[in-house]
Amino acid sequence: MNFHVLTLFPDMVRQGLDTSIIGRAMKEKHISLETVNIRDFSDNKHNRVDDYPYGGGAGMVMQAEPVYRAYGSVAEKSLAAGKGRKPRCIYLTPQGKVFNQTMVEDFAQEEELIFLCGHYEGIDERVLEEIVTDYVSIGDYVLTGGELASMVMIDAISRFVPGVLSNEESAQFESMQDNLLEYPHFTRPETWHDKKVPKVLLTGDHNKIEAWRWEQSLRRTKERRPDLMEKNKTLTVAYFSPTE
Ligand code: ADE
């Protein structure tokens, strides 16, 4: 999977992703990350890419042409490499569809993804109309730019790229797959601040442990994310009203 991020702050994106599991995935070439500095495509001698908004008002707006050229530099390369069609281009904005696990798995099917990060008051609408295929928000709050949002998406999508997670890591991170939260985890010591590890985890009885974890997952989801539980109606009914 090849990620391309169009941004005014390429270092922020590179540095943010170049550690831990995602950093390792890049080194092992399961994923690649190209950052494209929109400023490099400015047609202005001062390298400016923003201007005043028509109609007045506070803040500056990113101009269409530098964004269009930055996008073109990536889209053309990917067409030339014989990928057939232009890659999906995701614009990070609080006006987008709120990112969730279903969308993660959908985007993970792609070979190339372009992320467009806005700053200031936003980007000239005309270029968005021409290049953006998906408008995505990472939550109902406003960030100073799209960079952190693109990093969140790249992290979540990468987990679904084959080879990125070791077997142990994939088994560990199953939360959300079934719209369920993970069960609680414990490690040594057995007693900490007078709190004991649940006895069942010390029995070595894998069936019992699995049943306990499943029940904890359900309980936790019900308590902390009742909205997810709604999506799990069949599962919940099956669990809480056994037929036998
Ligand atoms: N840019 C600013 N706020 C954002 C958000 N909540 N999600 C995605 N991109 C953004």
Image: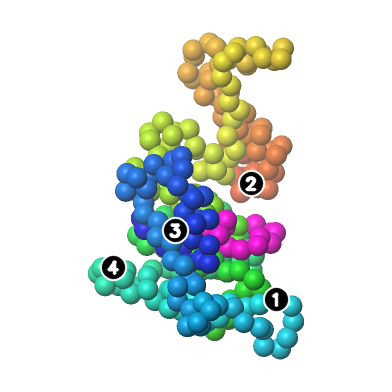
Task: Give the Cα separation between the discs numbered 1 and 4.
Answer: 38 Å
Q: Is residue 187 magenta?
A: no
Magenta residues, start to end: 139-150
Disc 4 or 2, which lies upstream in sequence?
A: 4
Front residue (pair 165, 77): 77
Q: Residue at x 47, y 18 (%)?
A: 206
Q: Disc 4 to disc 2, how far (Cα)?
A: 37 Å
Instruction: Please say if 94 is above or below 50.
Output: above
The label on residue 27 is none
Q: Gap in Å between the C-alphas at discs 2 and 3?
A: 21 Å
Looking at the rendering, in which quadrant would you find the C terminus?
A: top right
Q: Are marks 2 and 1 in contact (CB under 8 Å)?
A: no
Badge 4 element = helix
Q: What's the residue type where badge 2 is placed?
A: Leu
Q: Which residue is mark 1?
A: 59
How many C-alpha atoms fall within 10 Å of the one at disc 1: few (<14), some, or many (≥20)?
Answer: few
Q: Which residue is mark 4?
A: 83
Place of residue 91 in the rendered image (x, y in percent of width and height, measured from the top left): 53, 68
Q: Which mark is residue 107?
A: 3
User: Where does the image place residue 200, in percent across and percent down from the top left?
Assistant: 58, 15
Q: Which residue is mark 2?
A: 228
The image quarter containing residue 190 is: top right
